[in-house]
Image (cartoon, coloured by chain):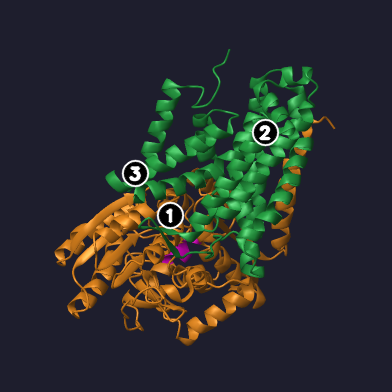
Amino acid sequence: MDIIISGLLLGGTYALIAMGLNLQYGVARIMNLANGELLVLGGLASFWLFVFAQISPLLTIFIVAPFAFVGNWLIYRFLLRPLVSRAKTQGQLEVDSILATFGMSFIFVGIMVMIRGEYFTYSFLAAPFEILGSTVAQNRLAAFGMAVVIGLALYLWLNHSRAGMAVRAVSVSPDTAKLVGINVARVSALAFALGGAVTAVGGTLISTFITLDASVGVIFTMKALIIVIMGGVGDIRGAIIAAVILGLVETAVATLIDPGLTLASAYLIFLLVLLFRPQGLFGKRPT
Amino acid sequence: MKRRDFTKTLAAGVMAASMAGFLATASWAADTIKIGAVWPKTGPLAGGATVTQGPNIEMWVKQVNARGGLKLKDGQKKIELIEYDDKTNPGEHIKAVQRLATQDKVDFIIAPFGTGFNIAAAPIYAKYGYPQIAVSAISDKIEELTARYPNLFFTLGTTTSFVEGVRDILVDIRDSGKMGNKIAMVNVADAFGIELADAARPIFEKAGFEIVYDKSYPLGTPDLSPVMKGAKSAAPDAFVAWSYPPDTFGLTEQAIIENLDVKAFYTAVATCFPAYAGKFGSKINYNLGAGGVNPDTPAMKAYFKAHKELTGKEPDYWASANTYVSLQILEQAIEGVGESDKAAVTQYIKDNTFKTIMGDIKFENQFSNRFWTVGQWQEGVFRGVKSVNVDGAATIQQKTGWN
């Protein structure tokens, strides 16, 4: 029982890390290597507001989300859009966007070091909570709850709204989407900005239970990449299910075998998925 | 401007701006002594270096320059500080030292941050003949290293002495009849954690302890709850973690959540950080950790006050003071020699006793055998409770729950 509950909570954390990148990569086709730094920026905002203004991280997300949305929209519009328009192939865009966002990640780290080079650590809801005989931390539970809310909202929006349908159309094929009158440039910018907002909110929530610092972003980028590729690019269900699988497996391995093998087990599953289902759990086979 | 140049220009602009900012901090008076410093401002070690290394360098340079500079034979010279970020990358560190030596032609360099860096960069410091007074470096290979590098000094202790410090504390508590002999021990799967755990196993067992839980976890593990649940189910009397900053915070938080009932709770690096008490408040009262200081001596009180005034930050309760001591030693050695002669300053460090905020420091075979090994949070202050040759250890208190 401990394993299932702790594993689900960790899966929720991983979903927060990966859902944003899934939108950015799956729809806007930008392999955003600054994803982790953006997440840490959300954590920094949370730390700052909590320590100096006693604002609860659960309120901070409503401040962080619009800022991250606008910031990411601007980044897409002025930094990445030119790359998209001149890229002749998907491959070229990937190479260009990887280089551009990699550079961007250094700028983010530099900015955060200027603000605070030390660890962003504070206590919020760091108290036990009993579910079905298993003790969990309240802050992890809160983050899990928000992950469920965000995941569900994204899923419903993507599958049951007109705008969501346009986003899915662009995800499937940007060229064909143009033919049916979808403004691909606008939808891509929207998806990128939304993805950025989700990532930053994820960082805000995660900072309540993981000690972050300005340079730790790359770890989250790696995790997000694994989850997005495992789940299938451009499918929000895939990312969530991959996140939960990873959370459950890591917790099971840590509890039953050895905590030292969690990373190895994560990469083993990743390898198995790549070997037997290279398009990811929910990905579409290339035609 | 072509669009594709925009990112390049932006990046160049940011770099130029940061260079300008850095140059602005360096004074360009004609008669200066150049001191170099290479430490991680970004990367995995940055969070610790920003607490322990950076502010002390800033404070020391400000203090020396405020009193007119270093007193040399040809008059007083202010310090011109040249700093580089090694990005927590040994390759970058070595490149930066090379640049300091050949391009900037600095007179002296402040030693690196971290055990690995001090050892990895020792050959390059030796090649250019800079005295290297290592602080944040703990190793059992000190004898071997100092024999190989005649300019390398160690000040913070050996791996074994740190483990023995923890053992002595645990033995004291056990022999007072307040605790059984079961230890749960975990370590971060990294050179530092593995070396300490390997040293600890035989030492603990020889002292009659039974290690009932012994696991490692990877650096950056996002969820340490399985580790703490596992340790708790082994019903230990004491919990020992050879941990790094993020997991020191993470393990302590999980122990509070699981209400781990132990008579002694030890976490290693960063337990001594002001942020540790800032995060957990009174819940961590009587927690044990690596390091310690005696905050009650007049010299140490003055140091804490000046650190806060000059850098705006609190020092940690361990290596911050040692870092400042290493700079005091460098300062006194340069003034003692009276000129920028690297070989003479190195020899001066070997031959003389230095008056520092931690008392008199003298090197024997390039090793200063005076340091704190274990400290304890006692009513909001992290006091040294076990040391090697340092006076003023506080009486150890027994942990009583997480309130």
Mark 3: give few (<14), some (14-19) or many (20+) Cα within 10 Å. Answer: many
Judging from the image, mark 2 belongs to the subunit labelled A
Going 28% across and 45% down the picture, which residue do you hit? Answer: A256
What span is colored magenta in the figure?
B342-347
Q: Please state, as top left, top right, bottom left or bottom right, where the C terminus of chain A lies in the image.
A: top right
Judging from the image, mark 1 belongs to the subunit labelled B
Amino acid bearing label 2:
His
Q: Which quadrant would residue B67 be assigned to in this image?
A: bottom right
Q: Which quadrant would residue A73 be assigned to in this image?
A: top right
Q: Position of residue B399 (x, y in %)?
A: 33, 76
Q: Is residue B251 visible?
A: yes
Q: Position of residue A215 (x, y in %)?
A: 56, 50
From the image, state the color of chain B: orange
Give the main secondary structure of the magenta stretch: helix
Magenta highlight on residue A29 = no
- Pointer 1: what residue? B118
Say which of B198 and A24 sits in front: A24
- Pointer 2: what residue? A160
Mark 1: give few (<14), some (14-19) or many (20+) Cα within 10 Å. Answer: many
